[in-house]
Amino acid sequence: MRSRHWAIRAAVPLLVAAGLVVPRASAASWNAAAPYQDPSLPVPTRVADLMSRMTLDEKLGQMTQAERGSVSNADVTTYRLGSVLSGGGSAPSPNTAASWADMYDGFQNAALATPLGIPILYGADAVHGHNNVVGATIFPHNIGLGATRDPALVERIGRAVAEEVSGTGVDWDFAPCLCVARNDRWGRTYESFGETPELPSSMATIVTGLQGATLNGPASVLATAKHYVGDGGTTGGVDQGDTQLSEADLRAIHLPPFRAAVERGVGSVMISFSSWNGARLHGHQYLITTVLKGELGFSGFVVSDWNGIDQIDGAPGTSALDVRTAVNAGVDMVMVPTAWRQFIDLLRAEVQAGRVTTARVDDAVRRILTKKFELGLFEKPLTDRSYTSTVGSAAHRALAREAVAKSQVVLKNDGNVLPLARGGKIFVAGRSADDIGYQSGGWTISWQGSSGNITPGTTILQGIRNSAGSGTTVTYSRDGTGIDSSYRVAVAVVGEPPYAEGQGDRPGSLGLEAADLNTIANLRASGVPVVVVLVSGRPLDIASQLSGWNALVAAWLPGTEGQGVADVLFGTVQPAGKLPVTWMSSASQQPINSGDGKTPLFPYGFGLTYAKEDSSPPTAPGTPVASAVTSSSATLTWAASSDDVGVAGYDVVRVQGSTETVAATSATASATVTGLAAGTSYTFAVYARDAVGNRSPRSGTVSVTTGGGQAGGCTAAASVQSQWSTGYVIQVTVTNTGTTSLTGWGVTFTLPAGHAVTGSWNVTMTTSGQAVTARNAAHNGSLAPGASTSFGFQGSRPNGDTRLPSGYACG
Ligand code: BGC
Ligand code: BGC
């Protein structure tokens, strides 16, 4: 949402008066707002009105996106540019949220100073937080978010990112990457939520987080599903490579996340640098126009990637062929960071020569303008600075810490070395332990990322110190030297140095670098148990070292909130992360993916929890109540047990004196006992079990007499509701076990000597000596075959007499 700076309109008449710009509408009609300026009109009406006022050059400008470093405010006005972007690491100076907002407002005012005053869309890669801005909250890269398996958390992150982005003016986020990373050699694997189509599809919730409920809502930012399509499927995991797949496989593996994003109303889709079976995606009319816009019904606009159209003809630079092929394929906005003037000239010539139709240009411009109107940009074009203070706010950092903790995947934990205990001495080592840049990875402040204190945050080492508390000595040495056997445990925080697209591809080894291996060797030489925390954008080839490590945690690229890693190391938060990608046994297995039959080191979905010591058994289940008693079966139901860790299930036992035999087991508080003999009396009780096998005390008992299997017949099952030293309450369930309806029933039973019935309900009772006869009440005498009804009574007994009534029979 933009601020309510309507006053900007005043700039246009001033410029007109100064002769600097010439409005297309006549001066007379200008004062009366044109229909496109009327927010009460439907968006399509506004778009049509605005387009009817636009020249070809104004339309071509709308389709053009230039990089901030290659375009001036004056250029935006003169060339009627539709969009400006920040490439990775491209930021104003000083790099603060406020100066981003100033920069944005400068470009936006330049756009508003054009005759028609069409606002620009400013785009940036906020791919794990607003990562170009110093001081922004840096969230885990997508691979870590995939490990959380928590789409609602990811939606909340989208909302937080949108607030930070809005606070700097930026309207448009080149995120999420909905890539399905199939080969870990690919340097963009960490931009993927995971290797299965389902996982990135489920995380399309981030689109809703970024865009909000409506595009003109508070802090709504236009999202981009990228990179369409198959970017994560290239042969060898080569960035910008060739995805060699059948159409059926392309659709099954790589298309579903885009479908999910379109269903969530994603505003833009970015085309992939890669090819499909040798054909560049940037010129792929079938995939862009037929499938995406046609079949999936995508109504937003398509943006090309950074100089992406240049690769169409295979020759360097932007050619007429590049331009017409991309636009005719269905690209609506063209990211031409530096060569934007040339692009406009080439496209104009193609249109004038009839090789690109005006209808195609109009379709592209209509799509772009529709999103600008929907975003409310015409009404609120400038930065909403009420969000500027959310950049790096405590609330957003707390959310990031939560996400970091939920993304940790514990892969090995021999001897329960984790969670780390407090007290004593802990040794921490590794070049990723105390480095915000390393733990954040690529796309952080700079495009490829870098080491050091590049932006404020909490390193993993600081998190460990905070969690360990003052009673614990935490010693850090980068390379692991200085450790001795007086330490209780050593934590090696090692992994990959930052990288982004291209530079992150690893065609050779996928192992740890020598520096990291040496650090771990130094720790191991002390004999102290070693916990390895891997800070990496993907699984690494560690199988040959794993046996020497006591524990292993995949921390991914957690971002600025390293406390979340320590939260799991110390068990403040239970580990819950599950592998979003299959973990190779060796680099030679790449590509390795769930379901491909290869034997991984750790399968997709793997992740340990900390085994809890569980010595306390569940509470006793409630006394069972019988129903649906037939000649051979009875259903028992009881009040559930509780347990500190969790009830795993129940055992129903038949009680015969001191002998118990298990008659049924159940995961829920109900079971049907089958295989009973007709006309026989049974006594049952129930135990609860927890996961480690602790058994609860026994429940009260229920007595059941099975039916005789004849045409008419009924059973009476008594269950003790409560008892005390001088009495009891018993509920009796009567079931028609015959094949014809009952129109009245009677239950007889025997009271032990000295007992008396002191009250009853839903029944009429008569007593003769110790024999009791219970006849149905007026309302419960009719029982269809198989139907049940219940009555109850209270009895008294001599103090200390534990006996109960017996011999229930129904007739
Ligand atoms: C930019 C990135 C862009 C890359 C493409 C870099 O200079 O900063 O945003 O993705 O070039 O090559
Ligand atoms: C990347 C995109 C990014 C764009 C703008 C390209 O090099 O592939 O993911 O959105 O640059 O920075």
Image (cartoon, rainbow, N blue to C red):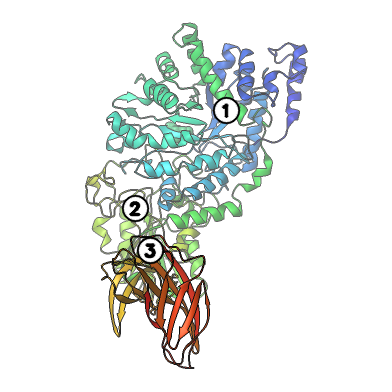
Instruction: Give the CA distance from mark 2 to mark 1.
Output: 38 Å
Residue displayed at 62% across by 38% down: 100
Q: Mark 3: which amino acid? A: Thr
Percent x, y of residue 329: 41, 19
Q: Secondary structure at mark 2?
A: loop
Name the residue beneath numbered marker 3.
609
**Residue 371 numbered mark, or none:** 1
How busy is the neighbourhood of tag 1: few (under 14 within 10 Å), some, or many (20 plus)?
many
- Say which element carries label 3: loop
Q: Which residue is mark 2?
A: 605
Q: Residue 577: give x, y in percent of width and height.
A: 40, 56
Q: Does ligand 2 reach within 8 Å of label 2's beta carbon?
A: no
Mark with earlier residue (3, 1): 1
Position of 644 compared to 215: left or right?
Answer: left
Against 615, residue 384 (above or below) is: above
What x and y, as percent, mark residue 13? 76, 19
Q: State whether residue 49 is above or below residue 168.
A: above
Residues under numbered marks 2 and 1 in contact, where contact means CB atoms less than 8 Å apart: no
Measuring 58% from the left and 48% from the top, which residue is drawn there? Answer: 135
Q: Is residue 159 visible?
A: yes
Visible in this render: residue 637? no
Q: CA distance from mark 3 to mark 1?
A: 45 Å
- Check disc 1 and give the amino acid type: Lys
> Distance between the Cα atoms at labels 2 and 3?
13 Å
Disc 2 marks which amino acid? Gly
Q: Nearer the viewer, residue 792 or 184?
A: 792
| Ligand 2 picture quarter | top left
Q: Residues within 10 Å of mark 2 (few under 14, many from 20)?
A: some
Check disc 3: other Cα within 10 Å, few if <14, some if 14-19, many if 20+. Answer: some
Most foreground residue, 627 or 637 = 627
| Quarter that holds the N terminus | top right
Name the foreground residue: 200 vs 124.
200
